[in-house]
Amino acid sequence: MDAIFLTSGDVIIDRRFEWARDLEAKGDLAAAADLLTQTVDLSPGYAAAWFALGDLRQKLGETGGAILAFEQAKAIDPEDRHGASLRLTRLGAVQVAMSDGYVRTLFDGYALTFDAALRTGLGYRAPELMLAAVRAARPDMTFGNALDLGCGTGLGGAAFKLFCKVLTGVDLSPAMVAQARAKNIYDRLIVGEVVAFLSAEAARHYDLVVAADLFGYLDDLAPALAATARVLAPGGLIVFSAETHDDDGVILRDTLRYAHSPTHVRKALAAADLECVSLDSAPARSEKGVPVPGLVGVARK
């Protein structure tokens, strides 16, 4: 059961929720779903229980019931902290962007174990791949103002710090930013949504923009790339990593991360008046020991 635990405010209802989680862990999905159905009958405003019920119904092959449960979870929690909209997208019911509330809640809960999970568990190597791509595009590796979009705990920033005079980081998750701040990598750190942040920054301000893993949480690249192009100085670079797939366009993978085709990325860069310098196939992480198809790209203002 993938639901984020958010209390109902009633200890008895919360115990029912945990009992259902235990039943699922033991493999009794039908009994867990029955218990959650009783739970939402008793507490119809409990979004976490509705989301968990949708998850179980989906696993049981009850698509219609799953859609109804996810719709209830989304209606109850306008921030959509559980990501019900993403589940509805996977079920073909809607096509929506990933909510800020979901991303913030996800990474706030992940912050303390993030570095170890990525480096050890997923073999994450996007920063190293991106650094090599930038070195190929700009061998002198000298940058004045640099910006790390979706900086997280600072894995990307750490790779580029030595080559930047001033390094700024921005991330939606306060807990992730707190981890980054403790590393003393950045000269400036901001908690905020990246497009809103970019829109408030001075134009032609940055020589380098780093976007490690950011595209996995964006269905539409156009707003972020257009806003990035506005703040890049002439000749400035953006380097990014992304998950990809063999068809065209963008898809939401079963990991609830977006994958963008190479053609889709090139078109998005061109629409933002960014010249694609390089776009290479390069898996930056693994899932269950299997490399995830990926892209590492550099574009120039």
Image (cartoon, rainbow, N blue to C red):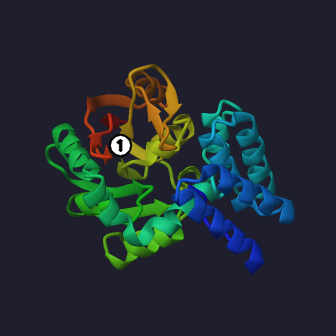
Residue 200 in the image: above or below residue 228:
below
Residue 85 in the image: above or below residue 186:
above
Q: Percent from the top left, x then y, of residue 201?
A: 53, 56
Q: Percent from the top left, x then y, of residue 195?
A: 56, 49
Does residue 166 show up? no
Q: Is residue 88 left or right of residue 152?
A: right
| Residue identifier under label 1 | 240
Q: Percent from the top left, x then y, of residue 49?
A: 71, 60
Along the line of sight, the residue nearer the viewer: 68 or 158: 68
Q: Is residue 292 left or right of residue 56?
A: left
Along the line of sight, the residue nearer the viewer: 146 or 80: 80
- Quarter of the rendering containing residue 103: bottom right
**What residue is shown at x 24% (from left), y 58% (from top)?**
159
**What residue is shown at x 46% (from left), y 23% (from top)?**
267
- Quarter of the rendering containing residue 236: top left
User: Callout 1: helix, strand or loop?
Assistant: strand
Crowding at dot 1, Cα within 10 Å, few <14 / some 14-19 / many 20+, comes out as many
Q: Amino acid at mark 1?
A: Phe
Q: Percent from the top left, x then y, of residue 256?
A: 52, 44
Point out the image quarter for the C terminus.
top left
Point out the image quarter for the N terminus.
bottom right
Does residue 290 show up? yes
Residue farthest along the left direction in this orientation: 139
Residue 130 in the image: above or below residue 222:
below
Along the line of sight, the residue nearer the viewer: 13 or 285: 13
Number of numbered callouts drawn:
1
**What residue is shown at x 51% (from left), y 36% (from top)?**
221
Along the line of sight, the residue nearer the viewer: 200 or 250: 250
Q: Is residue 116 left or right of residue 10?
A: left
